[in-house]
Image (spheres, rainbow, N blue to C red):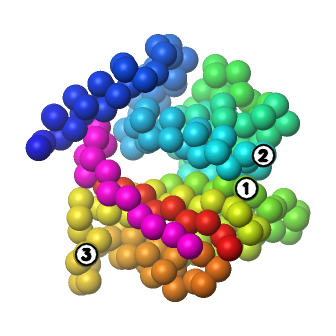
Amino acid sequence: MSKKNWTAVDDYIVSSLFAADPVLDAVLAANRDQGLPAIDVSAAQGKLLLLLVRIRGARRVLEIGTLGGYSTIWMARGLPADGKVVTLELDPHHARVARSNFERAGVSDRIDLRIGPALQSLAALSGENAGPFDLVFIDADKPSNPNYLDWAMKLSRPGTVIVCDNVIRDGAVVQEDSGDANVEGARAAFSFIGGDKRLDGTAIQTVGAKGYDGFAIAIVE
């Protein structure tokens, strides 16, 4: 199987299970037009995040890594009317594009976008007693995975769902001495989840329009 086949299957999933969504199409187009890297989650992955929000009955979601807000919008759509996504973005340009996308999607009232280094924003959230969050989605710089997971635990409670994206890295996660900081960050996520008795987790390999990767998912006991 090749990425061409995986992408065709992703297209089939979307055409078979999703209604046409010109708003999300426009969000991705805006991201491209503004020069953002094409590293958004796929539509199928975005819908999974929405479903996880709904399954969990989440009212408060924390996202680490906004980019252009594509995944943020998916999760915001899964929230009840009084729900909120707090999303953290380092790059001011990405944040400006995301804000415009939130307005386009009609979900600005459900989103609190914070700009700056994520670790500083996380410390600020803790200082504000902003937690606990019901679901945490980690999709930022991979070497910082263990720091983000540590903060996710501080801002969680029993029952909180934590999702950490991009942990398979084309299968390179099995390489102990890869020398790749992103692979090392993925391995650190496995070590953190597997080594913390407060977490019960697993990881899923995925193929699709985004290639071969996967995500870890855990629940706080």
Q: Which residue is mark 2?
A: 59
Is 127 or 71 nearer to us in this picture?
A: 71
> Which residue, as the protein is rendered here, is positioned at the far right?
128
Residue drawn at (73%, 73%) of the image? 154
Disc 1 to disc 3, C-alpha distance: 30 Å
**Residue type at the position of mark 3:** Val
Q: Earlier in the sequence, mark 1 or mark 3?
A: 1
The quarter holding residue 54 reads: top right
Which image quarter holds the C terminus?
Answer: bottom right
Q: Earlier in the sequence, mark 2 or mark 3?
A: 2
Magenta stretch, residue numbers: 200-212
How many neighbours does mark 3 have within 10 angstroms: few (below 14), some (14-19), or many (20 or more)? some
Q: Which residue is mark 3?
A: 174
How many neighbours does mark 1 have within 10 angstroms: few (below 14), some (14-19), or many (20 or more)? many
Q: Which residue is mark 1?
A: 134
Residue 16 position, x and y percent, is 37, 20
**Residue type at the position of mark 2:** Arg
| Circle 3: element type | helix
Disc 2 to disc 3, C-alpha distance: 36 Å
Residue 31 position, x and y percent, is 47, 30
Residue drawn at (51%, 35%) of the image? 47
**Residue type at the position of mark 1:** Asp
